[in-house]
Structures are given as C-alpha cells and as structure tokens.
Amino acid sequence: MDALDRLCQRLAEAVLRNSPGPLDRPLTIADIYQHLVPYRLVRAELGFSELKEYEHSLLRLLAGEREYVQVDLEQVVEEFRRELRSPNPILGMYRDYAAVGAALNPKAVQAAGASPQRAPALTPAPTPAPTAAPAATPAPASAAPEVSRGSAAPAQPAPPPRRRPTACWSCREPLPADREVRFCPHCGGGQLPFPCSECGTELEPEWRFCIQCGDRSAAAATGGNPA
C-alpha cells in the first residue's frame, strides 16, 4: 500500500465517521483538503515528511488515478493530469477548484482493499402492531416533487481562474501579459500563491505571515521570494 492508497483509506474513514450515509456522498474538493484529510492532521499518521508529498498524493487522487475519486468536471480532471505530467508541477493548484464537486468511488475503493469497516448497524426497534391508517390527504397540486436521494447533483460551473498580476509585487516592474508568469523576469520573485509549510493554507506571495496559523511565511523567510 503506497501513499495514494493510504490517503484514500484515510479519506474513506473520515467520510464514514463524519456522518452516516453512503461512501459516495457528494463532497467538494475543499471538503477533502480542508476538513476530511487536512495536511496538519494526517501528515504524521500517513508518513508525509513534507507538504509537497501530501499535495502530490492528493493531486493524483483528484486526477482520478486508480479511480478512487471522481471529480464532477472532466476539464478540471484534465487540468490536474496535465499539471502532474509537467516537469515542475504546481502541486497546490487544486485549491483553485475548491468549490468543484467530488465523490469517492466505492467499487474502486473496495476493490483495492482500502475500504474501512463500517460501524455496525443499530438494532432496529420493535415494530408496533399495525393500526388503521387514516385516509391520506392528497398533496396540493403545486407541491414540488420529492427529489430522490440517489439522483445526481446538478453540474457545477468551473470556478473562474485566478486573475494574473500585471506588475511584480516585489519590484513593481511590468509582467508579460501574453503568458502565465510564475516568476518575475526582472527580480525572480514568485508570482503564484503557495501553501503555508505549517498548515497548508494558501498564501499570496506578498504575505509575510499565515492567515490561519500565524506561521512566518516562506516569503518573509526568503526575502520576498517564496519559490
């Protein structure tokens, strides 16, 4: 069992422990990395020595590797796969798609042996003796039809991409407008958000401290260049 299998198993355990219901209940990508398997809680248990190991496994999971997780928008999945194939992938890019829906694939999880044991079912209460049921009151004609629990959730639109900066936050020189800029061509300063090394919260390159845990950010530690 490798890091991807362990992360999937931990996610399945968290889904079942969080509330009763099916393993493939609707989630969002934010639910997964913020609440169910956040880095700060699972790094020691799953053996992640640094944030990039966790983010690499999570991005593989969201990209559909081994079909453990199904993301609602295929174009988002393709974006994750392209990034994983790049020589210098931005592993935290899944944060740009936090609102996109996702769900575990029970068949793939169980086939891999990563499915956790469900809690035993509660003993049902004795069924009372049947009594004469009153006549059913017809529902008003305007009542909305009940939605089946198994019905698919409506497709979610892809979130808008992050606005590209027009000038370097560090040296204020103009940046090329016709391509993606990860580093300033004038001073080398990083231009993309980066995760807090302590809790994984996404930070802007000009921030000096984490907005969640208060840790001194990599931008301050490296003199304004988190990369």
Image: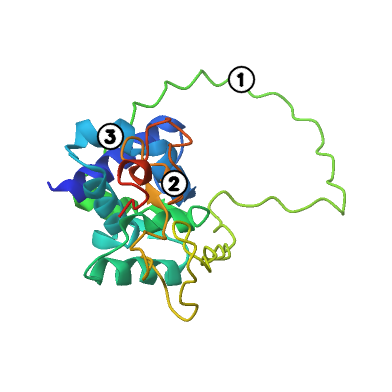
Q: Nearer the viewer, residue 217 or 86?
A: 217
Q: Earlier in the sequence, mark 2 or mark 1?
A: 1
Q: Secondary structure at mark 1?
A: loop
Q: Hey, what amino acid is under mark 3?
A: Val
Give the x, y percent position of residue 59.
31, 56
Q: Nearer the viewer, residue 3 or 128?
A: 3
Q: Residue visible at 55% across and 21% down? A: 127
Q: Nearer the viewer, mark 2 or mark 1?
A: 2
Left or right of 147? Residue 44 is left
The CA distance from mark 2 to mark 3 is 21 Å
Name the residue at 32% across, 35% down. 198
Q: Are the two marked residues, 2 and 1, in contact with CB atoms closer than 8 angstroms?
A: no
Quarter occupied by residue 79: bottom left
**Residue, disc 1:** 129
x and y percentages locating residue 106 in the rendered image: 33, 50
Q: Would residue 49 be found to the left or right of residue 107 on screen?
A: left
Looking at the image, is 178 positioned above or below residue 68? below
Density class for disc 2 (Cα within 10 Å; few <14, some 14-19, many ≥20) is many
Residue located 37% across and 42% down the image: 220
Q: Is residue 166 left or right of residue 65?
A: right
Helix, strand, or loop for circle 2?
strand
Real-space Cα separation, disc 3 to disc 1, in angstroms: 50 Å
**Mark 2 is on which residue type?**
Leu
Amino acid type of the residue tagged 1 in the rendering? Ala
Q: Closest to the observer: 200 or 171?
A: 171
Residue 203 is labelled as 2
